[in-house]
Image (cartoon, grey):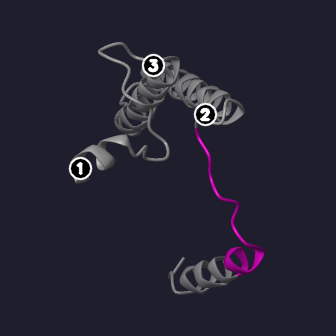
Amino acid sequence: MQNQQAGQQQVTGTSPLQGPQMSDRDFINDILATEKYLTNSYNTAVNEASIEELYQLQMKHLNDTHQAARDLYNLMQQKGWYNIEPAESQKISQKTAQFAEYRSQFPY
């Protein structure tokens, strides 16, 4: 009985199981994860490019993948598939002050 109840509970942010097929939400989430992976990879490649032409090409791809990830994020938010809680003003101010203090500790 307990296992049946646990199996019926739906975790926020996941799709209910509908067999082996992926939903639109699953596809878009998978593509977003891939775009995030690509941006990290291109970022490393850009930092290590030894030829200017290669650097410029990788920068173009990096910017393209960032834009694609942003577009997917916006689409998911519009559909209610990627929800974030807004930060409270007080917490933002506290973190801003905290990191400003860290910055003053750097020698440059």
What is the spatial separation of the Cα atoms under label 3 and label 1, in whole angstroms? 33 Å
Tell us which disc is closer to us: 3 or 2.
Answer: 3
- Image quadrant of residue 92? bottom right
Q: Is residue 79 magenta?
A: no
Choose the circle earlier in sequence order: 3 or 1: 1
Label 3 vs label 2: CA separation? Answer: 13 Å
Q: Position of residue 13 (x, y in %)?
A: 49, 42
The span shown in magenta is 82-93
Which residue is denoted by mark 3 in the rendering? 27
Disc 1 from disc 2: Cα separation: 38 Å
**Residue nearest the observer in this picture, 19 or 55:** 19
Q: Which residue is mark 2?
A: 73
Number of numbered markers: 3
Q: Residue furthest front?
A: 1
The reply to whether dot 3 and dot 2 touch (C-beta < 8 Å) is no
Amino acid type for the residue under numbered disc 2: Tyr
Q: Residue at x 77, y 74 (%)?
A: 89
